[in-house]
Image: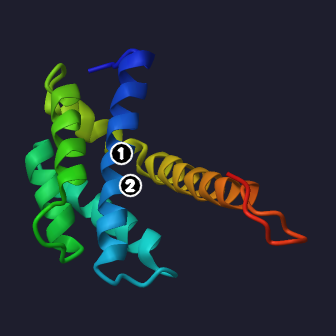
Amino acid sequence: MKLDNSKREALLARTVAVVLEVRRQYLAAGANPLKHWQQIHDRLRMATRTTTSVAEWTTRLQAGLKLGVPSSSLSSAVLLLEDEVACIPQPAWLDLLEREHAHVMALARKEAEDRKEQRLAETTATIDPETGEVFE
C-alpha cells in the first residue's frame, strides 16, 4: 500500500515518539549511554522483522531491551501509534519501518539532541555566566 506523504509523516512521528520513550525508560534502567542507540536500533529492526502488529512490535522491542512494565508515557505513545496505524493495514506500517528504520533512528536522535539543547539553553539563560547570579 502506498502511503500519502501526510500519513507517512504522521506514522513516522508516532513511531519516533515511541522510540524516544523506550530510550528514556531504557536509560533510566541503567543502559550504557555510549551504546544505547545501537542497541535500540538492533532491537527495533528485529521487532519489525518478526511481528505483525504494533502491540507485538512494542512487546518484542521492550523484551529485547529487557525493560519491565511500560511507563505511563510509553503506554500513551504506544496507544497513539496504534490509533495512527489503525487507519491503514498494519503491514504497511511495518513495511515503512523496515524500509526507513535508519531514518526513524535519525529522527529520534535529532529530537533527543534538540531536547537536550533546549534544556541546556533554558538552564544557562537563567544564570549569569560571569557572576553566577540567577535570573527569574
**Residue 6 on image: x %, y %:** 42, 17
Q: What crowding class fits label 1: few (fewer than 14 Cα within 10 Å), some (14-19), or many (20 or more)? A: many
Q: In which quarter of the image is residue 29?
A: bottom left
**Up/down of 100 relative to 74, above or below:** above
Task: Residue type at mark 2: give it.
Answer: Leu
- Residue closest to the far right: 130
Q: Is residue 33 left or right of residue 7?
A: right
| SS at badge 1 | helix
Mark 2, other Cα within 10 Å: few <14 / some 14–19 / many ≥20: many
Q: Residue at x 9, y 52 (%)?
A: 56
Question: What residue does disc 2 label?
Answer: 20
Q: Mark 1 points at which residue?
A: 17
Query: Which of the pair 50/13 is nearer the observer?
Result: 13
Disc 1 to disc 2: CB gap under 8 Å: yes
Q: Residue at x 29, y 67 (%)?
A: 25
Q: Determine whether the residue tagged by mark 2 lies in a helix, strand or loop.
A: helix
Tell me where residue 2 appears, x and y as whole percent: 33, 19
For the image, the number of numbered tags is: 2
Residue 82 sits in quarter? top left
Q: In this view, does 9 lie to the left or right of 87?
A: right
Q: Tell me what residue is drawn at x 11 percent, y 59 percent.
A: 59
